[in-house]
Image (cartoon, rainbow, N blue to C red):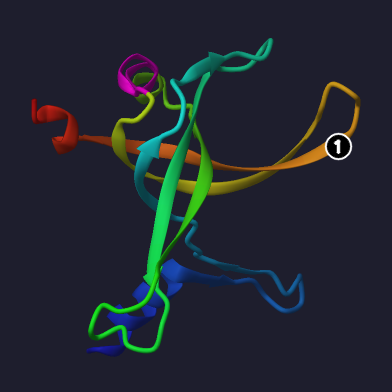
Amino acid sequence: MFRRPVLQVFHQFVRHESEVTSSLVLERSLNRVQLLGRVGQDPVMRQVEGKNPVTIFSLATNEMWRSGDSEVHQMGDVSQKTTWHRISVFRPGLRDVAYQYVKKGSRVYVEGKVDYGEYMDKNNVRRQATTIIADNIIFLSDQTKEKV
């Protein structure tokens, strides 16, 4: 009674082909990113000939930590590291909204996936690029700017 549903669920996640034909195993995986930060530049929209347009902007995220012996008593120096992320938006509706409403300094939440790619720069040198392909953007209110 219990065995059949478990096998059905298992087969949804893993598909094994016969060992006689090949040893191919297809498994589900996850490539998911969630970022919350501030936009570093106004977005630009680019279009390569024959391809769909893309909206691109940079997003800064910060890590903060205290150094020192006693973190319990809030002693020690506060250190901060800023990481910059390249955000690319390909989805037609979201791409246009991002291009119109994302502004430098605005606070946004981005969901998407990591993509590692290569391109040739102006000097014909192969470069590697890491980008976040956004599939959701949430605009957050900036309370520091709302107070006048």
Amino acid at pointer 1 = Arg
- Residue pictured at 48% horizontal, 51% vertical: 82
Residue of label 1: 126
Q: Quadrant of residue 13?
A: bottom left
- Residue 25, above or below 54: below
| Element carrying mark 1 | strand
Assess whether residue 71 is covered by the magenta stretch: no
Quadrant for the N terminus in the image: bottom left
Choose between 7 and 28: the one closer to the eye. 28
Q: What is the tally of numbered marks visible in this picture?
A: 1
- Camera-nearest residue between 19 and 43: 43
Instruction: Please report the residue visible at 54 percent of the width from the left and 49 percent of the height from the top.
Output: 114
**Picture coordinates of residue 107 (x, y %)?**
29, 37
For the stretch drawn in magenta, the main secondary structure is helix
Q: Is residue 89 visible?
A: yes
Q: To which quarter of the image does residue 7 belong?
A: bottom left
Q: Is residue 100 magenta-colored?
A: yes
Relative to residue 99, is residue 63 depicted above or below?
below
- Image x and y of residue 108, in percent: 30, 38
Is 69 displayed left or right of 81 in the figure? left
Residue at 67%, 75% (x, y): give it: 18
**Magenta part of the chain:** 96-103
- On the image, the x and y values in percent for residue 24 come to 69, 69
